[in-house]
Image (cartoon, rainbow, N blue to C red):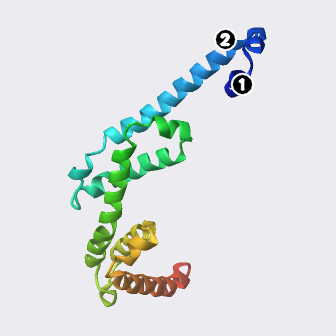
Amino acid sequence: AKSSYDALSEDAKARVTNVQKLEACLAKIEAIIGDLSGKIDAKINALPAPEDLTKENFGTYRDAILEAKNEYTMARQSVKDAVTKSEKLQQLVAKLKEFNPLLAIDLINALPEAEQIASEGDMVQIISVKNFFDTLSSNEQAEVANASKLSACVEKCSKAKSLVSPLAGAS
């Protein structure tokens, strides 16, 4: 509507009687964009500086970084353009991509060997690590040098589950 109004000749603009309504709508839209971008900026501000994100502490901030990234990604372009901290967010997301495979490697190393899985707790831990691994991009997964250990553990859990499941209703 604004571009149509702006395209009018001065004579035609003089005949428009409700231009104040258009201006009020535009002001409301700008306020909404400011509110939305402000909320995204606040989430980003609450995050550490990219240089302060380490392998040791990134797990603490991972969900918050992903939440801010998702909100930014889902925002309309006009909101994205108004976000002032998008560069910081991009740097933090890049750090996540760097640390995700390292965390996966550490989590897998902490798992028992497949032949040593002995409890439901072991299986829950394996499933938890597998769920994290599945959230990684294919490039990140390719960097996890010990992914075969996780696969062996998941396979063992699947076999154990299939052996126990038919007996579950037999008692």
Q: Which mark is residue 7?
A: 1
Disc number for residue 20: 2
73 to 165, vertically: above or below: above
Decide: few, some or many residues near mark 1? Use Cα within 10 Å; few <14, some 14-19, many ≥20: few
Question: At label 1, which amino acid type do we have?
Answer: Ala
Q: Name the element at disc 1.
A: helix
CA gap between label 2 and label 1 equals 17 Å
Indicate whether 80 appears above or below 50. above
Given the current orientation, which residue lies at the most extreme bottom position? 115
- Rendered image: mark on residue 58: none
**Residue sitting at x 44%, y 68%:** 137
Mark 2 residue element: helix
Nearer to the camera, 170 or 65: 65
Q: Earlier in the sequence, mark 2 or mark 1?
A: 1
Q: In front: mark 2 or mark 1?
A: 1
Q: Can I make out residue 130 in this image?
A: no
Query: Does 34 sit above or below residue 155?
Result: above
